[in-house]
């Protein structure tokens, strides 16, 4: 039993505020085979829409270089990012990209692979990933790109690539017209655009009656590759089937609902699945009241289990069927099989009493035909899945079969806080979150009689590839000495706290170099990278983020040297990079192409220690790196002497030339709020 929890009715419930160090992915209500987000830099119960641990719309689903990439919204604050080799075991990475000063919060979108480098943005040998997203103004459609398989991202310097209302661009390649196509959710419907290069777009057509989070793809009818149709989907997964010529979608079916549950929204499907696989695989945001479903948890919301979609001619029309991907078999821990049982009205049989995650597959014959005389139900930890010859329902949410059935396949995915039900081999699905009230699961005949032809109950193992938390990461190598304040290395980084200025310095020294890392304000008014400092931090330089909305360069004993105004949030990591060349310091913020501060000091300190600083509270540091290191560039004073150290600094000098180095980009952007440090 995890510390701080108690067992109630077969489930573990949260008993006290979540403690730092609690086992990640082992929390009481954490789904065990549905993806949920983690917290990176703090431990907070019941996270809100923009907090760590929250997720909503699926974004940018793509397969590349052997990895399935899953991205999702943290309510426009950033794109959550996870990868998998098998579609079921996931590793969450640091967020892909964040809101920024120019375009504000980063809304939903899609990712494509620019294998032909039509954008000209590719470097190296990796496939070029292009992410499309909407700015907060619901007009500017923008691009970010990655050359390292999604581990770091750069926002395109000429954003926006399209200014057109409203949001959620869905982009894909249309081979017949040899064009890229964008479907954009706009006022009253979807707009279609085309492009040769992914960076300039031409409006082609408009179709009314559609809203939010479009998805569009082609499926083979009954598996016949020679007969393929296009499917256009709404944000809630409802769809129409038709033809598409690269410019205009022509529907051939009425709009139909795909999933009838109460927790199914913002559907998306994976792009660039290899032809050898050929599936179109979908997931959705399982939208729910998270505080009621996951009380006291360090996460909020979850995503549906991946489902493969097929297009079938059924009941005289074309319908999309969806079923859990076959990869779920990799989670089967043990299996029980029951066959040939008959249940009369009122009879029931237990299925599971341990509240285990389950994959249940049942073939049931309704002994009283299709007149509705026979009804059955699965009772699942206080929730009820009912079935008849004509419909399937979960807790009152009901979907109807196109044709009455006497023999029915029912497939259930049962996790700690959710049920996904699939009826008639995927004709209907219902996706629901629920608050479990007890641990029992059973099958019952409510009316008439049922024959249980086959019942397979698979207990499922967890999906999480949970790695040990890495702790503080740095390549400085030397010993750390606390000059002022309280300092410790925690599971999430180097933490410093104290009133006023507080320094911790490393033994390693440098002259010319590039020094970079992530800094984050918790309660501090400012947090800084320190460079060229003496042993007591009485001289040197500090580059900080300031809660007043500033990036600042300042010097101990001398005060502020230069500043750059930008919104700064608490509990948001910011990336700082300083290139030091003799008396000139160039400060880069959040992976911008150009420095936000360039300062040449008339009283230069040319060598000294590396370190960190917090002011007026608690701050955190992570991934401190020094590259392109060398002795201080030679400065020539007016009297002809070479200037190197703090004691020899002189006015009136020139700097010997040296190339500015490249530094490997990491990922983060900006946010907002006010307060002051230095």
Image: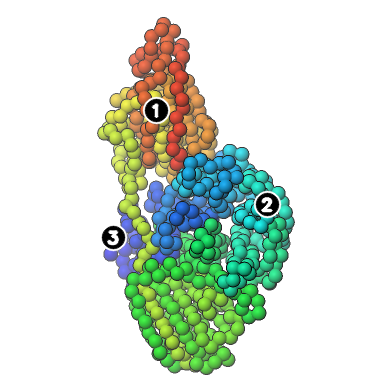
Which residue occupies 43% across, 87% down?
A: 452
Under circle 2, the secondary element is: strand
Label 3 – label 1 distance at C-alpha: 46 Å
Does 166 sit left or right of 662 as displayed? right
Q: Evaluate whether residue 33 shows in this view.
A: yes
Q: Say few, some or many: other residues with alpha carbon within 10 Å of mark 3 (under 14 / 14 to 19 / 20 or more).
A: few
- Residue 561 pos. (x, y %): 47, 24
Mark 2 or mark 1: name the one nearer the start of the chain: 2
Q: Dot 2: few (<14), some (14–19), or many (≥20) neighbours within 10 Å?
A: many
Q: Position of residue 556 (x, y in %)?
A: 39, 24
**What residue sits 57% from the left and 47% below the top?**
116
Find disc 1 in the rendering and name its residue: 513
For marks 3 and 2, give the CA distance. 56 Å
> Looking at the image, is mark 3 or mark 2 nearer the viewer?
2
The answer to whether any part of residue 53 appears in the image is: no
Give the residue at the far front of this rendering. 226
Q: Which residue is mark 3?
A: 3
Q: Is residue 614 left or right of residue 63?
A: left
**At 73% across and 56% down in the image, what residue appears?**
205
Please tell me the numbered disc located at residue 194: 2
Element on which disc 1 rests:
strand
Quadrant of image for the C terminus: top left
The answer to whether the residues at label 3 and label 2 have Cβ atoms under 8 Å apart is no
């Amino acid at each position: 039993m995890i510390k701080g929890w108690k067992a109630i009715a077969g489930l573990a419930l949260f008993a006290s505020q979540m403690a730092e160090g609690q086992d990640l992915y082992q929390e009481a209500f954490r789904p065990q085979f549905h993806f949920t987000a983690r917290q990176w830099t703090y431990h907070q119960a019941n996270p809100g829409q923009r907090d760590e641990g929250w997720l909503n719309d699926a974004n940018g689903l793509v397969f590349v270089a052997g990895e399935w990439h899953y991205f999702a919204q943290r309510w426009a604050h950033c794109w959550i990012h996870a990868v998998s080799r098998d579609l079921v075991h996931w590793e969450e990475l640091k967020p892909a990209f964040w809101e920024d000063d120019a375009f504000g919060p980063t809304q939903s979108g899609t990712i494509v692979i620019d294998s032909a480098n039509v954008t000209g943005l590719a470097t190296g040998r990796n496939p070029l990933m292009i992410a499309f997203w909407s700015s907060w103004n619901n007009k500017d459609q923008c691009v970010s790109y990655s050359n390292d398989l999604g581990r770091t991202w750069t926002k395109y310097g000429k954003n926006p690539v399209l200014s057109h209302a409203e949001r959620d661009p869905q982009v894909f390649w249309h081979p017949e017209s040899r064009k890229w196509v964008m479907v954009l959710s706009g006022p009253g419907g979807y707009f279609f655009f085309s492009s040769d290069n992914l960076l300039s777009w031409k409006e082609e057509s408009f179709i009314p009656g559609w809203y939010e989070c479009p998805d569009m793809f082609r499926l083979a009818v009954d598996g016949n590759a020679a007969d393929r149709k296009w499917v256009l989907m709404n944000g809630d997964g409802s769809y129409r089937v038709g033809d598409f010529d690269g410019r205009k979608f022509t529907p051939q079916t009425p709009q139909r609902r795909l999933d009838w549950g109460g927790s199914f929204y913002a559907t998306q499907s994976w792009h660039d699945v290899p032809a050898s696989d050929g599936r179109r695989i979908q997931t959705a945001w399982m939208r729910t009241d998270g505080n009621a479903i996951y009380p006291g948890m360090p996460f909020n919301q979850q995503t549906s289990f991946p489902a493969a979609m097929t297009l079938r001619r059924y009941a005289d029309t074309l319908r999309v069927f969806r079923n859990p991907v076959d990869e779920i078999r990799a989670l089967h821990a043990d299996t029980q099989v029951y066959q040939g049982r008959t249940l009369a009205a009122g009879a029931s049989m237990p299925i599971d009493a341990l509240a285990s995650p389950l994959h249940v597959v049942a073939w049931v014959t309704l002994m009283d035909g299709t007149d509705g005389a026979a009804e059955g139900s699965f009772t699942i930890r206080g929730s009820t899945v009912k079935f008849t010859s004509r419909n399937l329902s979960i807790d009152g949410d009901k979907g109807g079969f196109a044709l009455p059935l006497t023999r029915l396949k029912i497939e259930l995915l049962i996790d700690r806080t959710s049920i996904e039900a699939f009826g008639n081999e995927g004709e209907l699905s219902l996706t629901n979150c629920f608050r479990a009230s007890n641990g029992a699961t059973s099958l019952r005949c409510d009316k008439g009689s049922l024959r249980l032809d086959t019942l397979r109950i698979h207990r499922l193992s967890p999906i999480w590839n949970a790695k040990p938390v890495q702790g503080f990461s740095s390549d400085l190598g030397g010993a750390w000495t606390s000059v002022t304040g309280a300092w410790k290395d925690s599971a999430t980084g180097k933490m410093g706290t104290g009133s006023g200025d507080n320094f911790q310095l490393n033994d390693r020294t440098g002259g010319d170099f590039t020094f970079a890392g992530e800094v984050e304000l918790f309660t501090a008014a400012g947090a800084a990278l320190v460079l060229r400092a003496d042993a007591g931090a009485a001289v040197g330089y500090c580059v900080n983020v300031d809660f007043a909305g500033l990036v600042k360069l300042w010097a101990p004993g001398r005060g502020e040297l230069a500043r750059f105004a930008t919104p700064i949030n608490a509990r948001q990591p910011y990336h700082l990079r300083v290139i030091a060349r003799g008396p000139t310091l160039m400060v880069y913020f959040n992976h911008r192409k150009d420095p936000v501060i360039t300062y040449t000091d008339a009283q230069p300190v040319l060598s000294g220690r590396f370190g960190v600083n917090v002011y007026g509270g608690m701050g955190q540091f992570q991934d401190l790196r020094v590259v392109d290191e060398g002795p201080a560039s030679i400065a020539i004073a007016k009297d002809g002497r070479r200037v190197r150290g703090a004691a020899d600094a002189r006015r009136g000098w020139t700097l010997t030339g040296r190339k500015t180095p490249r530094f490997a980009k990491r990922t983060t952007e900006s946010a907002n709020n006010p307060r002051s440090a230095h």
